[in-house]
Image (spheres, rainbow, N blue to C red):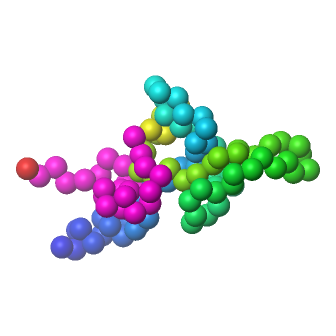
Amino acid sequence: MGVLAAALSACGSDPDRRCVDRDSYDYIKGYKIVADKNCKSGSSSAGKSRKTGKTGKAKVADADWYYDADVSGGYAEDGTFSRSEAVDRGGFGCSGSGSGGG
């Protein structure tokens, strides 16, 4: 029991998440990962409008948190936009760690 508690506390209670551009989906790669600042913390369906700051760079129009995904080459796939679904699936931020009993 102590080992399980240690494993859970080391991983955290929140599922792994990446900020992605929902408009960038690629059938092979998945969603393009963008800077976390494009997603509002703790909320879904973050920024919906393109705004420019002093630098003139446009922010991602449809950035959102994508949970419990496989990440490769700046893209995330096979995840979910639902935080509660990611928690139900057992995604606690520890990729590849799980018991292999059977």
| Residue 93 appears left or right of 66 | left
Q: Which stretch is magenta?
A: 78-101
| Residue 47 appears left or right of 1 | right
Front in this rendered view, residue 49 or 28: 49
Q: Position of residue 57 (x, y in %)?
A: 83, 42
Q: Quadrant of residue 6?
A: bottom left
Q: Position of residue 49 (x, y in %)?
A: 75, 50
> Magenta span has 43?
no
Q: Where is the N terminus found, in terms of image quarters?
A: bottom left
Number of numbered tags placed on the structure image:
0
Front in this rendered view, residue 31 or 49: 49
Front in this rendered view, residue 1 or 46: 46
Residue extending farthest to the top is: 28
Could you tell me which residue is drawn at 36 percent across and 61 percent down?
87
Could you tell me which residue is drawn at 36 percent across and 70 percent down?
9
Q: Answer yes or no: is residue 72 visible.
A: yes
| Residue 31 appears left or right of 53 | left
| Residue 97 appears left or right of 30 | left
Front in this rendered view, residue 47 or 37: 47
Could you tell me which residue is drawn at 58 percent across and 42 percent down?
22
Residue extending farthest to the left is: 102
Q: Is residue 78 above or below residue 63?
A: above
Q: Position of residue 56 (x, y in %)?
A: 89, 43
